[in-house]
Amino acid sequence: MTHMHKAAATCAGVALLVAGAAAQTVQINGAGATFPNPIYSKWFDEYGKLHPNVRINYQSVGSGAGIRQIQAQTVFFGATDGPMTNEQLQGSPGKILHFPTVLGAVVPVYNIPNVNAELKFSGQVLADVFLGKVTKWNDPAIAKLNPDVKLPGDDITVVHRSDSSGTTYIWVDFLSKTSPEFLKKVGVNTAVNWPTGVGGKGNEGVSGLVRQTPGSLGYVELIYALQNKISYGSVQNMGGEFVKASVAAVTAAANEAASKMPADFRVSITNAPGKGVYPISSFTWLLLYESPKDKAQAKAMVDFVKWALTDGQKYCADLGYAPLPENVVKLEMAVLEKVKVS
Amino acid sequence: MTRKDLGFRIATGIFGAVLVLIVASIGYELVRQSMLSIQKFGLSFWRTEIWDPVAGEFGALPFIWGTLYSSIVALLIATPIALGIAVFISELCPGWLRQPLVFLTELLAAIPSIVYGLWGIFVLVPAIRALEVSMPAVLRRLPIFSGPPLGVGMLSAAVILAVMVIPFTSSVSREVLKSVPPAQREAAYALGATRFEAIRAALFYARTGIVGAIMLGFGRALGETMAVTMVIGNNPRVSLSLFAPQYTMAAVIANEFTEAADDLYLAALVEIGLVLFIITLTVNSLSRLLIWSMTRSATAVAASEPTPEPAAEPA
């Protein structure tokens, strides 16, 4: 203590103030996915009110950048919409753990002049449209799913994301699972080589293009469609049911996945089996080192994650995210104990 | 030379050297970061049309094409308008209108590009689509107007770029025209020139500066990102059609850099940045060369005709 006092005495007044504050407050920096940014911001804000000594700073720079930054250890935690690959995990300086935090869904949005009915889609049809094989709205494949709707013979304009995003990842993951041809020709990534269509930047770019282009079909996040009151279609799930995306239908998908959850939580729940399940759903993950360098930060972060997985889940519905099923939370709590905080 | 002079000279010399150092280190860093992609694809990166992040195959051709095509079309639209504005303001405009016009053109330059982009999506794109739909079928058969009328695409991007470039080209041209010595115009009038001919003489006198102004606009168009990516359709295919959705180099970097996690993908994106850097450097050097050759030929003309023929006096 005495040498600390001596050192402090030599410092300028400003530096002393900063040093004093740092001794009490734990500052944690994180970066990653943009998709969960609204709920993360809400959590950090609410948690900051309960624990004024913990300050969490999150930069929503994108999943890829989040993974790069936690690998480079420039941030304490990362966040991603698509789980890290095996190569990425091996290329990291320490063992990284995945923690699902909330769930989201992606919905097909469309604009067909003079058609107000809610359309039904299957993964196969959506894949064929995005491959450029189905090009007219009155194509028999679409008409068969929607016998009550009078579809025009207009061309379909495909609208996809131009920026790489978790939304695209979830969408093509679903299309690849339902169509082997889509998997072979396009594949799964946050950005892909689209065979057809136009690219809009961000959810707002895609929905802007869809709203203005007669005959267009695109995809956006469920929250975005809900907040902006854009109409979207229902999608056929593995059991053959047509399900319209909702918070409940997304949690149902996660519930199904919970029984077969791998120990590292890296799981895709698109096209999940089960009743009432919306098939284009996904977790979003926080990334933490199993043995972080700074133990004070580690302790504060683990406490925060515990809070977010329990009390924090009540903020989900208002923001359009689906909360985690209880059994997934239970599994995560067990893994959180493994993080070395001392 | 006093000591102070020497100090000043060294200090400014260092500042000058910093500039060279910055440019060189940008180039070095771009090459270093894109090494993986340079080694894998070599020169074929410049002429490959595939951009497939899933398969790990990358080529810059559609982006190079889209960048140059959109910038050149934008320049073709913007240059006559910008020169018209400059000539009107500096030569013909009534005094009370001048300041408001100058203010308005400079205001155009101050609008953030994201605002241009949103305006593009909600106002310009529907208007362009209406134009595309109403185009007669005969013209639609030409390759330059082929493809479905989407609204988003090369034409929208070029128009929005033109709007963004106009204030730059017109402001600089106006300044250049202002610096034409009054003696030039007076001489033209003294020789019996009409107003149009006098303006033409002034434009000819200022031509190197005007080319510089146009090149400045071209440089701006090459690097513009946000507004373009919002209206160009972001489809990496080489197409001659003004209606087709295409892509630019700056746009693909902005769109894909944040989520690019795998090393080769990242290196390919940085190499796109390197290509843009090289192209911008080349364009700027070429414009320097053009200006230099124009000044030289002008001096040569002046030197070769030391004694102009005496004008025939009217009887």
Image (cartoon, grey):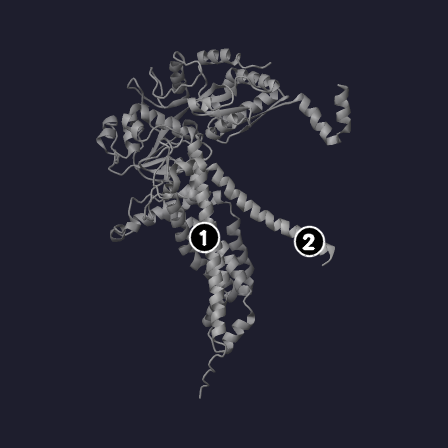
**Residues packed near mark 1 inside 10 Å, few (<14), some (14 to 19) or many (20 plus):** some
For residue B159, side relative to residue A42 (left or right): left
Up the image or down, A270 lies above or below B138; here it is: above
What SS does tag 1 mark? helix
Expressed as whole percent of the image width and height from the top left, the position of residue B67 reads 41, 47
Q: Quadrant of the C terminus of chain A?
A: top right
> Of circles 2 and 1, which is in front?
2
Chain holding disc 2? B
Expressed as whole percent of the image width and height from the top left, the position of residue A167 reads 41, 29
Chain holding disc 1? B
Q: Amino acid at mark 1?
A: Val
Q: Give the residue displayed 46% in from the left and 82% down from the top.
A: B311
Q: Quadrant of the N terminus of chain A?
A: top right
Q: Amino acid at mark 2?
A: Phe
Q: Quadrant of residue B44?
A: top left
For residue B84, side relative to residue A49 (left or right): left
Label ID, residue A331: none
Between A129 and A182, the one lying in front of the other is A182
Q: Residue furthest left?
A: A140
* Image label count: 2
Q: Quadrant of residue B102?
A: bottom right
Pointer 2 and pointer 1 on the same chain: yes
* Res B97 visible: no
Up the image or down, B99 lies above or below A153; here it is: below
Expressed as whole percent of the image width and height from the top left, the position of residue A49 reads 61, 22
Label ID, residue B283: 1
Residue identified by numbered label 2: B8
Between B46 and A9, the one lying in front of the other is B46
* Res A104 visible: yes
Q: Give the residue displayed 26% in from the left and 38% down from the top.
A: A154
N-terminal of the pair, mark 2 or mark 1, is 2
Marks 2 and 1, how far apart at CA: 34 Å
